[in-house]
Amino acid sequence: MQASLTNSVEPGPAHKGRFPFDLAALLFSLAAVIAAYVVAERVFERVPHLEDEIAYVWQAKAMAEGAITVPSPIYSHKFLVPFVVEHEGQRFGKYPLGWPALLAVGIKSGLRDWVNPLLAGLAVWFTYRLGKKLLGEIAGLIAAGLTLSSPFFLMNAGSLLSHPLGLVLSLAFVIAWWDLVGPRREHQLPPWLPAVTAGSALGVLGLTRPFTALGVALPFIIHGLVRMVKGDPQERKRLLVTAGVAGLLSLLHFGWQAAATGDPFFNPYELWWPYDKVGFGPGHGVAEGGHSLRQAWLNTWFSTYVGWHDLFGWAGYSWLLLPFGLPAIRRNGRMWWTMSVVVSLFLIYMAYWIGAWTFGPRYQFEGLFSLTLLSAAGLCWTAGLPYHPGEPYVSKTRWTRTRRLAMTAAAGFLVAVNLVFYLPPRLAAVNDLYGISRDALAPFEQAAEFAPAVIIVHADHWTGYGSLLELEDAFLTSPFVFVWGDQPGMRAELEAAFPGRNIFHYYPDEPGIFYTGPKGND
């Protein structure tokens, strides 16, 4: 009987059996859940900081009560919520509903702050599964470990942004894709299951981050067209099922736009900034003359620069293993297609007028696995470790053992450099981001006797007011509701609109002091 090849350590006198790769990957996944929650708790203090996060939380609060739009309040410009727009007497978040819907489940269950950490653990596990499928268990485990140690990954996983969900959906799509194309093998899943899984993952990604979904799908649209020509009839059917499921789910995005704006093709982003649209030329972005190829290149260059620092925290050299991964995958067609996801995301986001780098180049976050898998392949290639599925681990010569030991030590040193010297100050840089912290909420948590109340917040910048919105619900029925700034005649109308509520004036630079009138007139 011929023994099957595995990536196990070759049995010998000192070692019997095989290394438990799946168990190790599961432990990495659990560590990712814990690490992401620690970042959420210790760095971000479980409160939203970016305008995007505040809008997502507002949308989730509304959806938790069964609504996607709510009536606009009086003085709606004073009840400002960043990126929550007003249209025909209704207010709603400008973002698609995929992520707020999942966040709403977290709110209803009391586990909102665990949603992204749990997704982080799933992302690490899926990275291992994809790596195992394309490169073998050793490379898959290395990719999972690199993901776990990535500052880029941990910052986003600890946030309230949609990117961790996008990464999980992208990974699920790619894993299912490689199960659905090519010849069927014995003991595989039912033929329809990978097609439905791939289509569902891509469709939900389209409901979460539509432009990102296009970037993730683009390489596989091309690959799918190739397989439609070269594949057998059964494979063509599976591809059509995938496209059909993804397309039907994506149509729900246009249904949401129709329900919110009255026009299925009107992007709510434009209700906040009319120039906030994809494309080039006048009307796209804030630059004179509109978005340009030069600005696209500058955004991409700077995002890449930040990414080479944040990816693995190797002092600007996070790309170090990528060139060595190329010879490792030179004959691995599936890896070339998988690697192209991050390239596709960089290319399509050149058409968007603004970049993202506060939490790293997060518009490309959903392609993170392209870089971690290619880096893992590069480490295996340089160390003489297996990087093909089923390739055995064989000690071979003393030189091979020395080479493996040296590369393992070098990789361990780089990870230690990140964990000791790069990651802590990088996380510290986003702690109290924009001056927002949980400390701002403490005076209200200690002043329950004043509730219910309308709080007129006197702050020069939106962050002094926005940091308090964590305490407010979408329907303005929470114990405290907040108004940014005062104006003549507003108090009387607030009293009429919110009967039975006290009205106080609050100055964030004087925490815990509540004035019954504007300071100086009390």
Image (tube, helix red, strand yellow):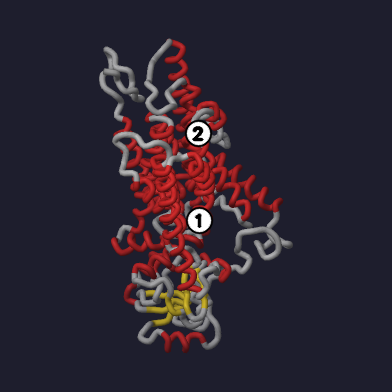
Question: For the point 37% across and 68% down, which residue is it?
Answer: 63
- Quadrant hosting residue 9: top left
Residue 114 visible to the viewer: yes
Q: Is residue 158 above or below residue 142?
A: below
On the image, the x and y values in percent for residue 58 come to 43, 67
First-in-chain label (2 vs 1): 2
The residue tagged with tag 2: helix, strand or loop? helix
Residue in front for this viewpoint, 432 or 183? 183
Residue 277: % across, % down: 60, 62
- Front-most of residues 245 and 435: 245
Residue 215, label in figure:
none
Position of residue 385 relative to residue 434, above or below, is above
Of the residues tagged 2 and 1, which is closer to the observer? 2
Residue positioned 54% across, 41% down in the render: 340
Q: Quadrant of the N terminus?
A: top left
Q: Amino acid at mark 2?
A: Gly
Mark 2–mark 1 distance (CA, rounded to whole Å): 42 Å
On the image, the x and y values in percent for residue 78 come to 51, 77
Q: Is residue 308 above or below residue 82?
A: above
Q: Which residue is rendered at x = 50% and y = 59% of the image?
A: 50
User: Which residue sits at x=52%, y=50%?
Assistant: 362
Residue 518 in view in this figure: no
Disc 1 element: helix
Q: Which residue is outermost to the top?
A: 398
218 left or right, relative to 186: right
Query: Which quarter of the figure has residue 247?
Result: bottom left
Residue denoted by label 1: 433
Write down the residue under mark 2. Answer: 333
